[in-house]
Amino acid sequence: MENNPIIQIRDVHKRFGHVRAVCGVTMDVATAEVVVIIGPSGSGKSTLLRCINRLETPTSGTIIVDGFDVTDPKTNINVVRAEVGMVFQLFNLFPHLTALGNIVLAQKVVRKRKKDEAEAIAMEQLRKVGIPEKAHAYPGQLSGGQQQRVAIARALAMQPKIMMFDEPTSALDPEMIKEVLDVMLELAAEGMTMVVVSHEMGFVKAAADRVVLMDHGVVIEETTPELLFTAPKHERTKLFLSKILH
Amino acid sequence: MTEPADVTAIPEDKEPRRIKLSDIPWWAVIIGVLGVYVIYSVATSQAYLDVLAFVMVGVKLTLETTAVAFSLALVLGLLGGLGRVSKNPVLYAISTLYVEIIRGLPMLVIILYMGFVVGPWIRDATGFNPPMLYRAIAGLGFGYGAYLTEVYRAGIQSIHRGQMEAARSLGMNYFQSMRYVVLPQAFRIILPPLVNDLSALLKDTSLISVIALSDLLQRGRLYASRTFRAFEPYNTVALLYLAMTLTLSSLSRLLERRMRVGE
């Protein structure tokens, strides 16, 4: 058991030209913790998430992930990324590969697994997300919910220590949101360390250990799901909740 | 959990298809009829058969030059295209310079330059005297490499940024992501323009006759000047070029159809 938090974010800033997306965020995520980041669009929550695996390079500040300083240019970021699964809003499956091919690729290229082993792990993950029968379907032949579940299986097959979700259900039709959330709930129950950007309050209530509300690039409030709904401290938190809880 | 309906199961069209006059590819029919007529007239005319026998060596040289020069251009174009999308300022500058300079020069000038300036320069510098054919192929390959650089660049840039991000966030490095994720998708998109440039290159090999290589056109001209007849040799040359380029374009149509699997 590690004593240090697996993710340590210290005074991180990120600017795009004149736009300040993230302005001095400090935050920890412990092993097996589920943290949900909420906030209005443009509040910097996705940018913060993308800084954790250096899809964006912070303008200043430090981020330590699993003992690696990802803000240090000398750190081999590929080693860190293999331990940090990422699920995107638009799935980003590779359209020229089957579901199985999507899940096998990085296992072979990055983890250097043999074809048989990688396929066995891929099938295991597809069973876990509930669509083993779609192994040989191409992404274009799958529904949005199925595609997102393949994307989750693809990330899980790398056996990462952390899973990050960037608005995983925002691009889905309402009837497909549940099938994706069910998979995420199962993961949370298994003790996966998760950082989730989402407005799914059902997921927050059921799985979050901690909720972080961001606005204009700063953390407004860090609280538990119970306190978020019953006793929000800040006016902006109340305002935001009133907008998303119809 | 209930599965959403299989989206691939599209109900089959039961209505019998009626062929309309506008459905027929008339251009192909006309080419087919003309082709049969031409083959018949050539096969029954001694004059054409003589020309054909004389220029066949040229066809071989034209095809070989096309194949080697295009392979060279494919490699140069890939390297150039990767440079054009690179964040490395040196690679970007080199590849952009290459494209801008070469695209601004007529192919004929590039071939003459390779033949009579770069060729002798290499000979004097290294002692190896590159044969004229090598110089011509280098010129064509280098020139088309610049065109293909832009084709590759456009193909790579047409792939959504999320593809590279997904590949990178799985821990693949930049080149692995290019090799396994971006380029295979880009290649499908650029296949038609690639074949287009292959046809153009095949036609441009006729320019190598200016440095005295006996390609198809050169053999035709030689025949014409020897016999003082223009009609049969130039007809034959034109038809042979046409036969080769039409073969290429139908090949690309076949390839495109086969690559559409899984979309």
Image (cartoon, rainbow, N blue to C red):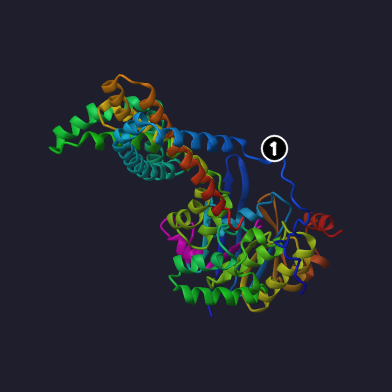
Q: Is residue A25 visible?
A: no
In the picture of the structure, the residue carrying the numbered disc 1 is B22
- Corner quadrant of residue B73: top left
Q: Is residue B68 left or right of residue A98?
A: left
Question: Is disc 1 surrounded by few (<14), some (14 to 19) or many (20+) residues within 10 Å?
Answer: few
Q: Is residue A57 left or right of residue B143?
A: right
* Percent position of residue A98, x then y: 58, 64
**Disc 1 is attached to a residue of which chain?**
B
Instruction: Say which residue appears at 65% left-offset and 40% top-offset.
Output: B24
> Magenta segment range?
A68-90
Question: Is B47 drawn above or below residue B173 in the view shown?
Answer: above
The C terminus of chain A lies in which quarter of the figure? bottom right
Instruction: Say which residue appears at 78% left-offset and 71% top-offset.
Output: A226
Residue B230 vs residue B142, the one in the foreground: B230
Residue B144 covered by magenta stretch = no
**Amino acid identity at mark 1:** Ser
Residue A72 covered by magenta stretch = yes
Residue B159 vs residue A201, the one in the foreground: B159
Instruction: Say which residue appears at 46% left-offset and 42% top-offset.
Output: B247
* Percent position of residue A132, x then y: 64, 74
Q: How many marks?
A: 1
- Corner quadrant of residue A16: top right
The N terminus of chain A lies in which quarter of the figure? bottom right
Residue B138 vs residue A207, the one in the foreground: B138
Residue occupying the far top of the picture: B228
Question: Is B245 drawn above or below residue A75 in the view shown?
Answer: above
Q: Secondary structure at mark 1?
A: helix
